[in-house]
Image (spheres, helix red, strand yellow):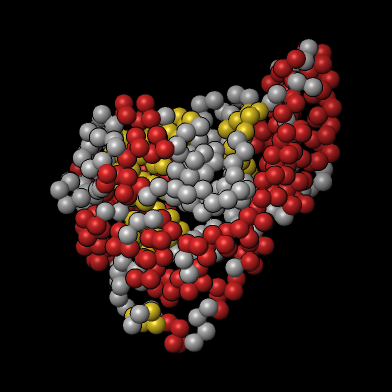
Amino acid sequence: MNYNDLTPAQAKEEYAGTLAEYEALKAKGLKLNMARGKPSKQQLDLVSDILTVLSDPADCMDGGIDARNYGELAGLPSARAYFADVLGCKPEQVFAGGSASLTLMYDLIAKGMTHGLKASAKPWAQETGLKWLCPAPGYDRHFKITESFGFELITIPMTEEGPDMDKVEEYIKDPKVKGIWTVPKYSNPDGVIYSDDTIRRLASMKPAAPDFALIWDNAYGVHEFAGEYVPFPDILAECEKYGNADMVYEFASTSKITLPGAGIACMACSEANMKYLLDLMGIQMISYDKVNQLRHVKYLKDKAHTLELMKKHAEIMGPKFKLVTDVLDREIAPRGLATWHEPKGGYFVSVNVKPGCAKRTWELCRDAGVVMTGAGATFPYGKDPQDSNIRVAPSLPPLSELEQAMEVFCVCLRLAALEQMTK
């Protein structure tokens, strides 16, 4: 029954029945969580043997370097080589850090504010009217970083090929526009893989701001859950090809490969940028946790071995995403209430409901015991102009709970739409 074809009387009748379904679900006192892209206990158990990789003091030696001691600001050479293998760049372009790439991203923007991103650039804090491009739907934590430093956030619509590059190329003519956030593979939340043309246009940009930063958050570069690994170009080499070697900063981590709370992360950039940033970082720290870096290198070994591990993750993740899209296909598609992407990797399903219904759907889910990412979170300032995008995160709950959560979600989505129709 397509809700768009209902007469007013039919809509009222459908509303009454759906409200009864909702009240029955609410009475169950459920406590279910689809809010964040957290790996499940099953995934954490899969890799928990990483904790015993370093069982002897001799295991802490890495090419003559004792990982337990001071030194190696840019990270263990083996950790830098590991990330270079995964990303396709050179080890000398990699900075290996601690558990969160978000920390490295925040620190980079902070250094732009206090010192400038290049030796020749003045600190952003000495400028006014700073702006930042934010492809949306996108990652709320990205947006919060630049918002916290006072940038004006400019929404760039997402397409099936990545950010709307016509708009990007228009905005970067303004020297006040200092950068852009990107998640190029299995974007958060749409699950889009940037097309070759989008990557070329990003790499070849000629921004008016000489200190413009292309933030390339390659968070899901090896995170397929359906099908084979999709190769992806080295953005550092692509930018260098167009004379933009110093424009790009790439980030990645093992957060959803090993243990999110105890992983390792990296930043990759040009060698010139690396030298400049290391001079600043050398005042800030001596090094990140090299013991954990070594633990990961010994456990993950290289890209090929990592991809084999990710196939085991896919065996856990794949059925969850299939359940989500199967339920949406069964309960929502025939009613004409939403559209969604069906990604083959990443951690989210992006659902676009009828305009004006996202927040109400979220509220109904909350009141029925299902926690979800707040409606609007995928847009700058938490304001979705259409009030239509909802991010579903299937990874954390076991299948039985996920099925319950999706039942609640679909009933809430139906009820929100019917409320709007019967006003």
Viewer-nearest residue: 368 or 193: 193
Viewer-nearest residue: 39 or 12: 39
What residue sits 77% from the left and 52% below the top? 400
What residue sits 41% from the left and 42% below the top? 182
Viewer-nearest residue: 93 or 355: 93
Q: Is residue 422 visible?
A: yes
- Horizontal arrangement in the rendering, residue 418 relative to residue 184 (left or right): right
Residue found at the very far bottom of the displayed protein: 57
- Horizontal arrangement in the rendering, residue 348 relative to residue 82 (left or right): right
Q: Quadrant of residue 387?
A: top right
Viewer-nearest residue: 298 or 390: 298
* Image coordinates for residue 350, horizontal then vertical, percent: 59, 37
Asked if residue 240 is positioned above or below residue 289 in the image, the reply reads above
> Quick one: quadrant of the N terminus?
top right
Asked if residue 262 is positioned above or below residue 223 in the image, the reply reads below
What residue sits 51% from the left and 72% below the top? 299
Q: How many marks?
A: 0
Q: Is residue 134 visible?
A: no
Q: Quadrant of residue 86?
A: bottom left
Asked if residue 33 is positioned above or below residue 261 in the image, the reply reads above
> Quick one: quadrant of the C terminus?
top right
* Image coordinates for residue 258, horizontal then vertical, percent: 54, 64
What residue sits 66% from the left and 62% below the top? 41
* Image coordinates for residue 131, horizontal then vertical, percent: 31, 35
* Image coordinates for residue 205, horizontal then vertical, percent: 29, 35
- Horizontal arrangement in the rendering, residue 32 relative to residue 160 (left or right): right
Q: Quadrant of residue 25?
A: top right
